[in-house]
Image (spheres, rainbow, N blue to C red):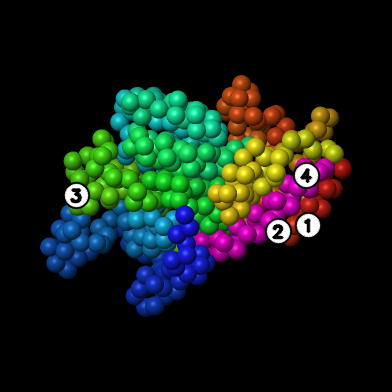
C-alpha cells in the first residue's frame, strides 16, 4: 500500500505545513507562543474550550498553538488522524502505557528494546502489568505470548544496537485478528523511511529528538493515532473520554491522562526547533542512509572487523524484509572488532566521529555499547541480546562519506 501518491512529495508537504496552517501574519514558521495561560473575552468560550466543545487552549501544560502546529506536521507525515507531543520520546512511551493499561493487563514487547524503554516496562511490572519480551523478528514468538489479558503489542522497527528488524507485517495482522492495540516505535526509521500505518499500526511513537529534529539541539516525543483502531472495543477507556467520535477516544485519554496529568509537556521553543529540523528530514535521511551503507560495506570487507550488523547489508538476517518495508536502512549499525584489537583504543583513535550517546544527529556518533548504554543490563542479558563486550554502535551523520571512511581506515590500522 503506497498512500503517498495522493499528495505532494514528502518534503514539499513538510516545508509548507506551517504556512498552510494559516499563521496570523503569514509567518512561514509557526511563532513561538510563550504564554502559560490563555484568556477569553466571553465566559462561554472559556467553558466550551474546557469542555472540548470548541478548539482552543487554556493552559500550556495541555496544549499551545506552537506545539499543536508541530503535532499537525507529525500527523501529516505519518498519515495519521491526530498526534500528542511530549517533552521527550520516553515521556511519549510512558504516557501511552500509563493512559491505556490497567493492573492485570499483559503486553507483548520485544527482547531487543531500546534500553530505557526496556527499563520502563520493567517498572510497569511493579504496578501489576505483565510483559513478555520476545524475539519480534519471528511472528511465532509473538503469537505464543498472547494471552486473554493481552491488550497491546509494542515493537520498534529496527532495534538498537544489533539492528534486528521486527516482523512488522505479520504482527500487524495478528493484532488486527485479536483486537490488540499495535504500537510501533518508528524512531529508528522515521516517517520518511517507513509508514507504520501501512502495516496496520494503531499508534506510532516517535522520539523527535532523533531523526525528525535531526540536529541534536532539542528533545521531544510524539504519539500519533493512525485512525485504524476502534476504541469503542478497548476495555480501558474511561467513561469521561467516551465523547464524540470513538476513533478519537484513545488519543483523548492519552492527552488527558498521559499529558495533562503527568505534565511532561513539550516546550514551544523546542517545538519550533524540531519543526525547523523536520523540514530537511528527507534530505538528511537520504544522505545518512547512503553514508551508512558505504561505511557498513567498508567495515564488512575489513580484515580487522568481525561481524557487522546493518539491515542494508545482504548478510543481515532480515535484509529482504528491510528492503521491502523501508525506503532505506537508516543510519544505525554496530560491529565487532577481531580479537586482539582493543575497542576502546580504536575509539580513541577516531578523529571525526563523536564519542557520545545520541543517534540521528547530523554528526556521526560512536559508542561502546556494553560499557555504556547496555551496561546496567549486565552480561547475561547482553549475551541474550547478541551484544558482545566489544560491540561498537555507529550512528552515521551527513558528513562526506570519503572523510568518514578515511577516519575509520586510520583508526582500524592504528
Ligand atoms: C531515543 C529513543 C527513544 C527515547 O527518546 P528520547 O527523546 O531520548 O526520550 C525511544 N525509542 C527509541 C527507539 C529511541 O531511539
Please, what secondary structure does the residue beneath circle 4 have?
A: helix
In primary-sequence order, the first of circles 4 and 3 is 3
Q: Residue at x 60, y 29 (%)?
A: 385
Could you say which disc has been placed on residue 243 in the image? 3
Query: Which range of residues does the magenta coloring cover?
Result: 276-302
| Residue bearing the label numbered 2 | 399
State the image quarter where residue 127 is shown.
Answer: top left
Mark earlier in primary sequence (4, 1): 4
Q: In the drawing, does residue 337 fall left or right of residue 118?
A: right
Describe residue 220's horizontal placement relative to residue 342 as left or right.
left
The CA span between labels 4 and 3 is 55 Å
* Residue that badge 4 annotates: 299
Label 4 vs label 2: CA separation? 17 Å
Q: CA gap, disc 4 to disc 1?
A: 14 Å
Nearer to us in this view, 413 or 169:
169
Q: Nearer the viewer, mark 3 or mark 1?
A: 3
Which tag, 3 or 1, sits closer to the chain's start? 3
Q: Which mark is residue 366?
A: none
Q: Earlier in the sequence, mark 4 or mark 2?
A: 4
Image quadrant containing the C terminus: top right
Magenta run includes residue 295:
yes
- Residue under the point 48% across and 58% down: 2
Q: Which residue is mark 1?
A: 403
Amino acid at each position: 500500500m503506497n498512500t503517498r501518491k495522493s499528495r505532494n512529495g514528502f518534503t514539499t508537504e513538510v516545508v509548507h505545513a506551517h504556512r498552510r496552517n494559516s499563521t496570523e501574519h503569514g509567518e512561514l514558521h509557526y511563532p513561538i507562543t510563550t504564554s502559560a495561560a490563555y484568556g477569553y473575552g466571553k465566559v462561554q468560550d472559556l467553558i466550551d474550550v474546557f469542555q472540548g466543545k470548541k478548539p482552543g487552549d487554556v493552559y500550556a501544560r495541555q496544549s499551545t498553538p506552537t506545539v499543536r502546529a508541530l503535532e499537525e506536521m507529525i500527523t501529516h507525515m505519518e498519515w495519521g488522524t491526530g498526534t500528542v507531543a511530549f517533552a521527550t520520546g520516553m515521556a511519549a512511551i510512558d504516557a501511552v502505557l500509563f493512559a491505556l493499561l490497567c493492573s492485570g493487563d499483559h503486553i507483548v514487547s520485544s527482547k531487543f528494546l531500546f534500553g530505557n524503554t526496556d527499563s520502563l516496562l520493567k517498572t510497569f511490572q511493579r504496578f501489576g502489568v505483565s510483559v513478555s519480551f520476545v524475539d519480534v523478528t519471528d511472528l511465532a514468538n509473538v503469537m505464543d505470548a498472547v494471552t486473554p489479558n493481552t491488550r497491546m503489542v509494542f515493537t520498534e522497527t529496527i532495534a538498537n544496537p544489533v539492528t534486528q528488524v521486527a516482523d512488522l507485517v505479520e504482527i500487524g495482522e495478528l493484532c488486527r485478528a485479536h483486537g490488540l492495540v499495535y504500537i510501533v516505535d518508528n524512531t529508528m526509521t522515521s516517517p520518511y523511511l517507513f509508514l507504520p500505518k501501512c502495516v496496520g499500526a494503531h499508534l506510532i511513537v516517535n522520539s523527535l529528538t532523533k531523526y525528525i529534529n535531526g540536529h541534536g539541539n532539542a528533545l521531544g516525543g510524539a504519539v500519533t493515532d493512525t485512525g485504524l483502531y476502534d476504541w469503542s472495543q478497548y476495555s480501558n477507556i474511561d467513561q469521561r473520554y467516551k465523547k464524540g467520535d470513538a476513533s478519537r477516544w484513545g488519543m483523548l485519554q492519552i492527552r488527558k491522562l498521559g499529558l495533562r496529568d503527568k505534565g511532561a509537556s513539550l516546550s514551544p521553543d523546542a517545538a519550533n526547533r524540531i519543526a525547523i529540523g523536520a523540514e530537511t528530514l528527507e534530505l538528511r535521511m537520504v544522505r545518512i542512509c547512503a553514508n551508512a551503507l558505504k561505511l557498513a560495506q567498508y567495515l564488512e570487507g575489513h580484515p580487522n572487523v568481525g561481524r557487522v550488523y546493518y539491515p542494508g547489508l545482504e548478510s543481515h538476517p532480515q535484509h529482504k524484509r528491510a528492503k521491502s518495508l523501508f525506503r532505506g536502512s537508516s543510519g544505525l549499525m554496530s560491529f565487532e572488532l577481531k580479537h586482539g584489537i582493543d575497542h576502546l583504543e580504536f575509539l580513541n583513535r577516531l578523529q571525526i566521529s563523536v564519542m557520545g550517546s545520541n543517534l540521528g544527529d547530523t554528526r556521526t556518533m560512536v559508542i561502546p555499547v556494553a560499557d555504556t548504554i547496555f551496561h546496567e543490563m549486565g552480561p547475561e542479558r547482553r549475551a541474550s541480546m547478541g551484544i558482545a563486550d566489544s560491540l561498537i554502535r555507529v550512528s552515521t551523520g551527513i558528513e562526506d562519506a570519503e572523510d568518514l571512511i578515511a577516519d575509520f581506515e586510520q583508526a582500524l590500522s592504528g
